Image (cartoon, rainbow, N blue to C red):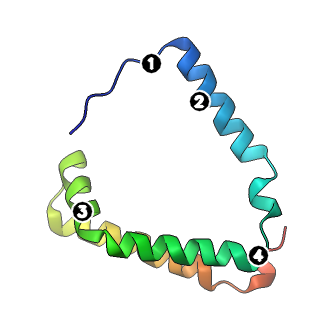
Amino acid sequence: MAVIPRGTREDVDIAVKAAYTAFHGESWRKIKAFERKEILFDLADKIKTHRDELAKLESVDVGKPLSQAYADVEAAIRYFRFLEALPIRLWVT
């Protein structure tokens, strides 16, 4: 599927720092609750638009039947729709 270069210790340090910053940062918290819902809605739409490509990639990547890969993609869409549909008061941090 792809050629993946061998990472160096420095690459790992950069990735860990970026993940830590993203997890503990303020970026997501500063987004208004209704804007977060729109982001999740848009993400679900993008997954739905690209479901064929994503299912084929998942099938090849993991070696599962295409039918199961499609079910996984559909589940992802449902999860993001579920999160998007939660009452806005649950989004306030």
Tell me which label, 4 or 1, sits earlier in the chain.
1
User: Circle 3 sits in a helix, a strand or a loop, which is it?
Assistant: helix
Q: Earlier in the sequence, mark 3 or mark 1?
A: 1
Query: Residue 78's spot in the image, x, y percent?
Result: 45, 78
In this picture, residue 87 sits left or right of residue 70: right
Query: Gap in Å between the C-alphas at discs 1 and 2?
Result: 10 Å
> Label 1 neighbourhood size at 10 Å, few (<14), some (14-19), many (20+)?
few
State the image quarter where residue 19 is shown.
top right
Between 11 and 68, the residue placed more toward the observer is: 11
Taking the spot 29% from the left edge, 61% from the top edge, the residue there is 54
From the image, tell me which residue sits under label 2: 15
Marks 4/3: CA–CA distance = 31 Å
Do callouts 4 and 3 mark residues in contact (Cβ within 8 Å)? no
Q: Amino acid at mark 1?
A: Gly
- Mark 4 or mark 3, earlier in chain: 4
- Residue carrying label 1: 7
Quarter of the image for residue 53 reads bottom left
The amino acid at mark 4 is: Ala
Give the Cα distance between marks 3 and 1: 27 Å
Name the residue type under label 2.
Ala
Q: Which mark is residue 79?
A: none
Which percent across, then down, holds residue 33?
Answer: 76, 75
What amino acid is found at the position of numbered circle 3 in the picture? Glu
Indicate which disc residue 33 carries.
4
- The label on residue 53 is 3
Question: Does 87 sit left or right of 16 as displayed?
Answer: right
